[in-house]
Image (spheres, rainbow, N blue to C red):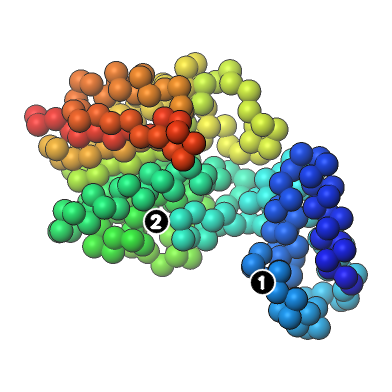
């Protein structure tokens, strides 16, 4: 099998169908059991093709690759097909029932870490609506002294959260409760959240609308019903002068600021790499 010819054919088909060419590389690498970067190393690929322990023949490799391409061209997210998503320096397991971590959220993590390091003591962090565990695990990996709690109440997401905590071997406590009633009496230095914030009537790309869990996407009529609940939970869970960081839609910065104004100060809106308002940080007022 000349994998280069088949890969170029698939990339061309993806491009003509409006999908990223890199998805074809990710799928072939997945079938071969190597990384995308290794796929471009002909020596590695040839060795893999010489030792097809999991395949009856090279034609079997091609057949599996084509089957995965059909799924992608049908709209299924490449992360669900391969079963993995990359976030910060983590490899997370994902599938139907859990939101796929987005690269935009990585910048939020990068800005949290210096604050936690500056405290120079053991810290407590709560990740509300943890989903796959991307935020909680990234923080626990980078700040080993932090006591991290992941709050998630959706059964589907909890399955993936447990898998990722075990696979990444981090000390993260899971609490399977609703954010409004969870952890009564607990106080944290930092609360982070990436709640559902998309307005219910907003149209979404096919692969998002038809595959990812709506409970993790839609936040109410204006998208703010759920974020307001998360803000209320953070207000209760934070220590005085503790920090709350929440992702939101680019058009929701003003609404988020208004919701925070009662219990929080030092409210700051932060842009993503495209200059769009993407997340807000705030400090809990002294009670």
Quadrant (top left/top right/bottom left/bottom right) for the C terminus: top left
Foreground: 2 or 171? 2
Determine the residue positioned at 63% across, 28% down: 204
Quadrant (top left/top right/bottom left/bottom right) for the N terminus: bottom right
Per the rendering, the mark at residue 59 is none
Secondary element under disc 1, as helix, strand or loop, is helix
Between the residue at mark 2 and the residue at mark 1, the CA separation in whole angstroms equals 25 Å
Per the rendering, the mark at residue 38 is 1
Mark 2 = which residue? 138
Image quadrant in which you'd find residue 246: top left
Circle 2 packing at 10 Å, graded few (<14), some (14-19), many (20+), is many
- In percent of width and height, residue 42 lies at 75, 76
Determine the residue positioned at 71% across, 79% down: 44
- Mark 2 / mark 1, whichever is N-terminal: 1
Determine the residue positioned at 74% across, 43% down: 19
- In percent of width and height, residue 76 lies at 72, 44
Q: Is residue 149 left or right of residue 46?
A: left
Which of labels 2 and 1 is toward the front?
A: 1
Secondary element under disc 2, as helix, strand or loop, is helix
Contact check, label 2 and label 1, Cβ < 8 Å: no
> Is residue 133 positioned above or below 180 on the image?
below
Residue 111 visible from this viewpoint: yes
Circle 1 packing at 10 Å, graded few (<14), some (14-19), many (20+), is few
Q: In this view, does 138 lie to the left or right of 268?
A: right
- In percent of width and height, residue 84 lies at 59, 57
Residue 184 visible from this viewpoint: no
């Amino acid at each position: 099998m000349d994998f280069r010819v088949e890969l170029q054919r698939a990339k061309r088909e993806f491009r003509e169908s409006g999908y990223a060419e890199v998805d074809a590389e990710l799928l072939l690498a997945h079938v071969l059991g190597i990384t995308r970067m290794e796929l471009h190393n002909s020596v590695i690929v040839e060795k893999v093709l010489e030792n097809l322990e999991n395949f009856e023949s090279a034609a079997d490799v091609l057949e599996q690759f084509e089957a995965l391409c059909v799924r992608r061209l049908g709209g299924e997210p490449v992360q669900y097909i391969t079963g993995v998503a990359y976030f910060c320096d983590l490899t997370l397991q994902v599938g139907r029932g859990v939101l796929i971590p987005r690269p935009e959220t990585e910048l939020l993590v990068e800005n949290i870490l210096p604050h936690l390091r500056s405290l120079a003591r053991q810290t407590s962090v709560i990740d509300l609506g943890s989903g796959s565990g991307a935020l909680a695990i990234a923080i626990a990996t980078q700040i080993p002294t932090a006591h991290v709690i992941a709050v998630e109440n959706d059964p589907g997401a909890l399955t993936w959260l447990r898998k990722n905590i075990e696979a990444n071997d981090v000390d993260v406590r899971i609490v399977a409760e609703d954010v409004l009633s969870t952890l009564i009496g607990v106080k944290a230095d930092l609360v982070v959240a990436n709640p559902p914030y998309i307005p219910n009537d907003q149209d979404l790309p096919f692969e998002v609308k038809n595959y990812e869990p709506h409970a993790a996407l839609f936040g109410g009529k204006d998208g703010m019903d759920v974020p307001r609940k998360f803000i209320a939970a953070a207000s209760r869970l934070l220590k005085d002068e503790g920090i709350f960081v929440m992702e939101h839609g680019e058009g929701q910065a003003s609404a988020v600021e208004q919701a925070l104004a009662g219990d929080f100060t030092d409210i700051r809106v932060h842009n993503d790499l495209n200059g769009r308002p993407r997340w807000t940080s705030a400090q809990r007022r002294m009670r």
